Amino acid sequence: MRNVLELLERAAERMPEKRAVGDQDSSFRFLELQQAAKALAGGIGNAGKNQPIGVLADRKIRTVARILGVLYSGNYYVPLDPDLPAEKLRAILEETDMQLLLGPAEAEQSARAAGFQGVYISTLPFGPSLRDLPDVGGDDPLCMVYTSGSTGKPKGIVKSHGAYLDWLEAYCETFHLTENEIIGNQTPFFFDASSKDLYLMLYLGATLEIIPSKNFLFPMDLVDDLNRRQISYLCWVPSALSIVAQLNPFSLVKPRFLRRVFFVGEVMPMKALNTWRRALPELEYVNLYGQSELAGVCCYHVVRGEYEDTACLPIGRPFSNTQVFLLDEQETLIREANRTGELWIASRALALGYFKEPERTARCFLQRDFGAGPVRCFRTGDLAHYNEHGELVFSARADDQIKHMGHRIEPGEIETAANGLEGVVQSACLYDEKKQRIVLFAEAKRSGSEIRRALKEKLSDYMVPGKVILLDKLPLSANGKLDRQSLRRRL
Amino acid sequence: MDELLEILLDIDPDVDYETAEDLIDGKLLNSLSILQLIAEICDHFDIEISPKWMRNENFNSARKIWEMIQAIQEED
């Protein structure tokens, strides 16, 4: 296989009438999805090859058709939040110089307000197949996802068709997944994590069910929906599973078709997992670990045995397509238990690099030889150790990066946005683990409420601080640097 | 009710909770804030919100949330 479109071609040929993807209102069968995507590719026309094309991604089946339509056109897609603040969208449009956006009609106005002057395609044309498969190989880009950047500028990570194909093979082989899976999608399509659901559907010829985000607030409705659509497999962020656990609906309703509960994106609170396991002990629970800088995930741990509520779940061991190295500061391999080092990943599923940032790419993706020949590695910035069973356990970040509700956030991006506001002298961003919210400390001549409101214009929803605390002066340590420890005590 | 308004304002001070009737449907409360709200309510009013109360209509306005808290307290 050379590209992910061959997966759809295969599924459409083998089972054209099977439900491929469904949302609250409608669905595509595999043949319909293929035809819709090809018709869209025809509408895209001669946009060139390997060019980035934006997809404003809502929670509808049409988003899946748009993504695949971009791929059929021989280009790669950049999934974007339709509610992205204008300033952030403008920055991405300027950096990528995208001349084509696909998205719902209702999102066009905000794209125009962000300065987009190119062609906006909102309709899904239906008709006969217009194109053959494009000449796209494993090394060609498939998508570019944006993540938070420490300097205030989001980073675009470009990933290839080959990376996804490689991950899919290793993943499905490990868990013996079949075309009978019905996948319950939780993460929006503009987040990297959703690509796992999408390509798993294509690879297996399984069904992808898009769950309305409102259901995650009300677990009774959520479980009803899981049962109605006979969902058998979930791969959600722990925050979503925790909400269900905290509001524990299982004494009243249970998901009857569910077989597998996988989680990824942040540390799974053991108490929440134990609630799930006590209520639904027959299910398979798997802790997954990955980075946006690779397709899919790279490590897994199948949860077995009992864990105390205070225990830390291992991230386990690498998939067959991946090598993971635990290194000390001198880049020497750590093999013994309970010694902390940084995780480096070598895998064929690694990203191609950062968009238009060759220096950053060279700094983070490195060629190393740890004894078995040179391999291309990604330096994760995650600290970990081996436990007594030889399993990897995540410890902490090597830097200040925050994980909030499954999203990776650089405090620097929030601080840069806040410091750029009129009336803000200086700010510092911390994460309150107990209340699970982002807190911004600021020296400012504006109220906290005004600062939050202004930040909503600049940052994605999930990055806007939950609380702003105004201080006369931010505390400094003896060497004149910002004293984050002192601020932490004020949380 | 004032205590509830204080909790809500702490979560998002930009919403007019006195008049808003579409906290969920209007996406004024999202999944990031609902968990915080529930935790704060349970903590502050020393109650447990059982799953049967977790319905859209009980959370769409401050008044509705307050009625739910009172009903749970009466049940206890």
Image (cartoon, grey):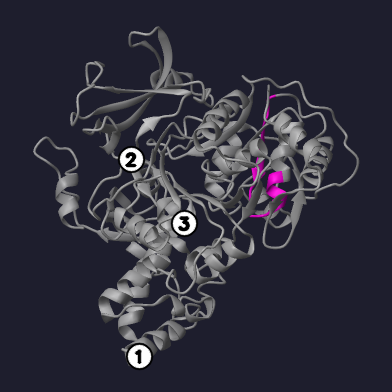
Residue at which label 3 appears: A456
Q: Real-space Cα distance between discs 2 and 3?
A: 20 Å
Chain of residue at mark 1: B
Pointer 2: what residue?
A: A401
Residue stretch rendered in magenta on the structure: A50-64
**Which of the pair A489/A403 is nearer the observer?**
A403
Disc 1/disc 2 C-alpha distance (Å):
44 Å
Residue A193 forms part of the magenta stretch: no
- The chain that hosts pointer 3 is A
Q: Nearer the viewer, residue A456 or A378?
A: A378
Q: Are marks 1 and 3 on the same chain?
A: no
Depicted B66 relative to depicted A18: above or below: below
Query: Which of label 2 and label 3 is nearer to you?
Result: 2
Crowding at label 3, few (<14), some or many (≥20) Cα neighbours within 10 Å?
some
Identify residue type, mark 1: Glu
Label 1, on which residue? B75
Cα distance, mark 1 to mark 3? 40 Å
Q: Pointer 1: residues within 10 angstroms few (<14), some, or many (20+)?
A: few
